[in-house]
Image (cartoon, helix red, strand yellow):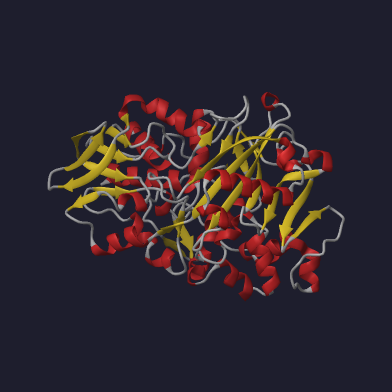
C-alpha cells in the first residue's frame, strides 16, 4: 500500500534507534541555532541539536517550559493538580516514548487500578437526559438509531464505523500518511462515518459521546483519524504519574541556561550569512544572531512577529489562515469523590455547553486523600458556548449549575476553582491546530516547509497534530533538517 512522505522526514527508521536520535546523524559543521518557544517541539529540537554538537539558544516568552503542556498545582489542595493542556498519550507515540524512557518519567495506563477511569458506570448527559450505562443494562439513547446501532451504544458505534476502517490497512508512522488515509482529507469525520453507513443519530452519538467528537464535524477526517483514532487503536491511553509538565521540566533542566525565559521574539531578519532575532525582554530589546532559527510557536502567535524578508505568499497564507480549536477548561475542587457512592465514574460525555466532564488528577495517589477535581472541558469551533462570554463569577455559577445535571449535589462538596481559556492566552491563542477538509493535503506540507534559514516545528506541522507526539516528532524533524542541511 502506498504512502506519501508527507513531511519529508529523514528516512532513518525510528525503531531500533536509542536516544539521542542525533547519534545516528553525522554533523560536519557546528551551527548556532535559535529556537523560538520552549514547548515540547522547541525542547525536542533543542535536545537533538545539543546532542549533535550544535550551539543552541531557546527563547521562551513565558517564565516556564512546556507551552500547551500545562499542569496546574497552585490554588489546589496538597496532592491535587489538574492538566489544563495535554493529558494523554499511548505507546504508539514512538518519539515521545523515547524521551519518556530516557528521562525516566513514570506513567500508567488509564485502566490501571489506581486511576479513576477504572471505577464506576459510564455517564452521559444527552438531549436533556442523564444516562447511566451499566455493563449489562439497556439504555434508551435519545437519538434515532438503527436497531443494531441502539444495541451497540456509543463505544460499539465508534468501533463499527471508525476503528474498523483500520483493519488490514497501513497505519500512519513517522511523518508519512498511507494513501487510504490521505484520501479522507476531503471530508469530515462524520461524513466519513456516514459513508460507512452511520445513521444521522449515530453521527450525533459520535459527535457528543466521545472526547474527539468536538472536531468530528469541522476538521479533516484524515486529521482526526490519524491524530485521534490511530493513536489509541488497540492500546490503552497513558498518563504521567506526576503531571504532564514533568517531561518538559526534565528536558528544560538538562538544557539549563540555554533557555532564556521572559524573552519575546518580535522580529526575524534573514540575511545571506545568518539570521537575527530581535528579542524583547524586561522592557528592552536586543538581538540574537544565529545560523538557523527553529520557529516552534503556534501560527497565531507567529502572525505578530515581523519577518524580513517576508515569508513566501504560500507560507504566509497558511500562517494567517490556519485555525486553532477553542477550549475553555474549568476545574472544580471537590472535598470528596461523592460520585463513587453512586457507583458512577467522575467522567461523563455531554452535549451541554460545559462539554466533557473529566475527573482529575488522571492518576489517584494517597496524597490526594478523598479530594478530587471535576473539570468542565468545553471545546468548540465557531460560535462559542454560553459560558465563554461570562464574567468569572457568573461562569462559575453557570458551570456549577450545569455540572449538577451530571453529578447532582456537586455544590455541597465544592471548595474552589480555577480555569484556563486557551484562546485568551497570548502565547497560544488556541488549544491546538484545526485542519479543515482539504487542508492536510494542501496546507500541512507548507506549514512544515523550511524557508531559507527558518525551520518550522510544533504540533501544527505534524500529521499527528493536536498531540504531544506530533510536537516532539516535529522538533526532531526540524533538528534533522538543520543537522543534515
Which is more toward the observer, 95 or 385? 385
- Point out residue 73 in the picture as x, y percentages from the top left corner: 55, 30
Q: Residue at x 53, y 49 (%)?
A: 328
Question: Can residue 438 be seen by looking at this rendering?
Answer: yes
- Point out residue 7 in the picture as x, y percentages from the top left corner: 38, 56
Which is more toward the observer, 485 or 419? 419
Up the image or down, 332 lies above or below 157; here it is above
- Point out residue 329 in the picture as x, y percentages from the top left corner: 56, 46
Question: Can residue 89 be seen by looking at this rendering?
Answer: no
Tell whether 77 sits left or right of 40: right
Tell whether 309 sits left or right of 436: left
What is the quadrant of residue 238 in the picture? top right
What is the quadrant of residue 362 in the picture? top right
Up the image or down, 319 lies above or below 112; here it is below
Which is more toward the observer, 319 or 339? 339
Up the image or down, 343 lies above or below 1; here it is above
What is the quadrant of residue 320 in the picture? bottom left
- Point out residue 179 in the picture as x, y percentages from the top left corner: 49, 67
Q: Residue at x 26, y 41 (%)?
A: 265
Amino acid at each position: 500500500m502506498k504512502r506519501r512522505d508527507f513531511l519529508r522526514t529523514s528516512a532513518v527508521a525510528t525503531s531500533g534507534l536509542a536516544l539521542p536520535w542525533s547519534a545516528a546523524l553525522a554533523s560536519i559543521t557546528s551551527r548556532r541555532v535559535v529556537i523560538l518557544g520552549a514547548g515540547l517541539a522547541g525542547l525536542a529540537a533543542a535536545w537533538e541539536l545539543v546532542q549533535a554538537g550544535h550551539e543552541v539558544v531557546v527563547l521562551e516568552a513565558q517564565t516556564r517550559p512546556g507551552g500547551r503542556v500545562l499542569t496546574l498545582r497552585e490554588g489546589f489542595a496538597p496532592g491535587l493538580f489538574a492538566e489544563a493542556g495535554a493529558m494523554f498519550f499511548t505507546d504508539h507515540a514512538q518519539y515521545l516514548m523515547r524521551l519518556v524512557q530516557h528521562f525516566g518519567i513514570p506513567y500508567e495506563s488509564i485502566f490501571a487500578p489506581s486511576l479513576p477511569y477504572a471505577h464506576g458506570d459510564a455517564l452521559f448527559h444527552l438531549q436533556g437526559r442523564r444516562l447511566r450505562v451499566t455493563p449489562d443494562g439497556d439504555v434508551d439513547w435519545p437519538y434515532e438509531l438503527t436497531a443494531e446501532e441502539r444495541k451497540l451504544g456509543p463505544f460499539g458505534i465508534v468501533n463499527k464505523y471508525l476503528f474498523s476502517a483500520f483493519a488490514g490497512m497501513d497505519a500512519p508512522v513517522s511523518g508519512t500518511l498511507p494513501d487510504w488515509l490521505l484520501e479522507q482529507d476531503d471530508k469530515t469525520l462524520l461524513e466519513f462515518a456516514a459513508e460507512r453507513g452511520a445513521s444521522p443519530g449515530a453521527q450525533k452519538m459520535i459527535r457528543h459521546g466521545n472526547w474527539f467528537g468536538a472536531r468530528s464535524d469541522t476538521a479533516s477526517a484524515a486529521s482526526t483519524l490519524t491524530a485521534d483514532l490511530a493513536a489509541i487503536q488497540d492500546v490503552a491511553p497513558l498518563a504521567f504519574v506526576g503531571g504532564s509538565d514533568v517531561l518538559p521540566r526534565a528536558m528544560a533542566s538538562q538544557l539549563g541556561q540555554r533557555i532564556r525565559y521572559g524573552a519575546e521574539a518580535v522580529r526575524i531578519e534573514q540575511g545571506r550569512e545568518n539570521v537575527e532575532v530581535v528579542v524583547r525582554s524586561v522592557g528592552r530589546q536586543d538581538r540574537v544572531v544565529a545560523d538557523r532559527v527553529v520557529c516552534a510557536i503556534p501560527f497565531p502567535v507567529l502572525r505578530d512577529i515581523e519577518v524580513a524578508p517576508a515569508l513566501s505568499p504560500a507560507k504566509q497564507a497558511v500562517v494567517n489562515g490556519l485555525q486553532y480549536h477553542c477550549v475553555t477548561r474549568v476545574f472544580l475542587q471537590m472535598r470528596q469523590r461523592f460520585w463513587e457512592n453512586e457507583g458512577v465514574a467522575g467522567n461523563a460525555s455531554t452535549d451541554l455547553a460545559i462539554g466533557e466532564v473529566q475527573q482529575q488528577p488522571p492518576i489517584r495517589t494517597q496524597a490526594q486523600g478523598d479530594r478530587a477535581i471535576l473539570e468542565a472541558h468545553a471545546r468548540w469551533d465557531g460560535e462559542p458556548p454560553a459560558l465563554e462570554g461570562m464574567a468569572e463569577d457568573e461562569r462559575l455559577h453557570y458551570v456549577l449549575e450545569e455540572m449538577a445535571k451530571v453529578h447532582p449535589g456537586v455544590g455541597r462538596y465544592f471548595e474552589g476553582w480555577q480555569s484556563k481559556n486557551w484562546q485568551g492566552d497570548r502565547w497560544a491563542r488556541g488549544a491546538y491546530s484545526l485542519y479543515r477538509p482539504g487542508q492536510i493535503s494542501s496546507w500541512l506540507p507548507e506549514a512544515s516547509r523550511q524557508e531559507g534559514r527558518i525551520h518550522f516545528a510544533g504540533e501544527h506541522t505534524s500529521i499527528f497534530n493536536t498531540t504531544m507526539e506530533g510536537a516532539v516528532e516535529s522538533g526532531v524533524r526540524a533538528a534533522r533538517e538543520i543537522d543534515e542541511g
